[in-house]
Image (cartoon, rainbow, N blue to C red):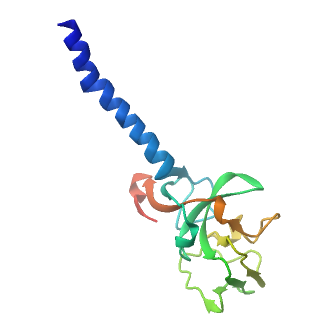
Amino acid sequence: MKKSNAKEFIMNWVIPFTLAFIFTLFVKKFVFFNIKVPTESMYPTIKIDDRLLVTKVYNPKNLSTGDLIVFTIPEYDKKLIKRLIGKPGDVVEITKDGKVSVNGEALKEDYVKNPGGKEGVTYTVPEDCYFVLGDNRACSFDSREWVQSNFVKGEDILGKAQFTIYPFDRVGKV
């Protein structure tokens, strides 16, 4: 009887929990992850302490202008989240009044809080690189400010933000 109880315990509890644990690790490693936003650089789209669900990106060429991407840069050892503005080969111009155009076409940026910061500059995005900006331009550490390179390398893009999952009153698509 004891051997049967041990087998039943293993079949009903140990194996399902082990499989669930392995599945969770697999999903977290290969499908999605979550991040906590530490700054106001993406305000009002994303607020300080928001938690976001991010899907992993395996081919940055599938990203679109306006996507919110999570990445790392060599001069800063933390994950950053910014809005994708320029893709490889694009010419990004920021006018003196903070308006942004890509390849001569003005972007409609209803999400921008403060258009301040470094203006009157043109950037040509190199191959396999991306140009990003925060929505709160006056308070954003983004492509305009980086010292080593003004661009995010494709290999440094970790994912695309999909949903706000916390706080609960802000749950929804970003």
Position above or below: 41 against 17: below
Residue 62 or residue 36, whichever sits in front: 62
Position above or below: 110 against 18: below
Q: Residue 63 placed where, x, y %?
A: 54, 71
Farthest residue to the left: give it: 1
Residue 16 or residue 117, whichever sits in front: 16
- Left or right of 10 on screen, residue 81: right
Residue at 37% across, 30% down: 18
Residue at 32% across, 24% down: 14
Residue 104 or residue 141, whichever sits in front: 104
Residue 173 falls in image quadrant: bottom left
Q: Residue 124 placed where, x, y %?
A: 74, 81
Position above or below: 12 against 50: above
Q: Residue 157 placed where, x, y %?
A: 61, 61
- Left or right of 154 on screen, residue 169: left
- Left or right of 68 on screen, residue 144: right
Residue at 19% across, 13% down: 4
Residue 100 falls in image quadrant: bottom right
Residue at 67% across, 71% down: 128
Q: Residue 170 placed where, x, y %?
A: 42, 59
Farthest residue to the top: give it: 2
Quadrant in which the N terminus appears: top left
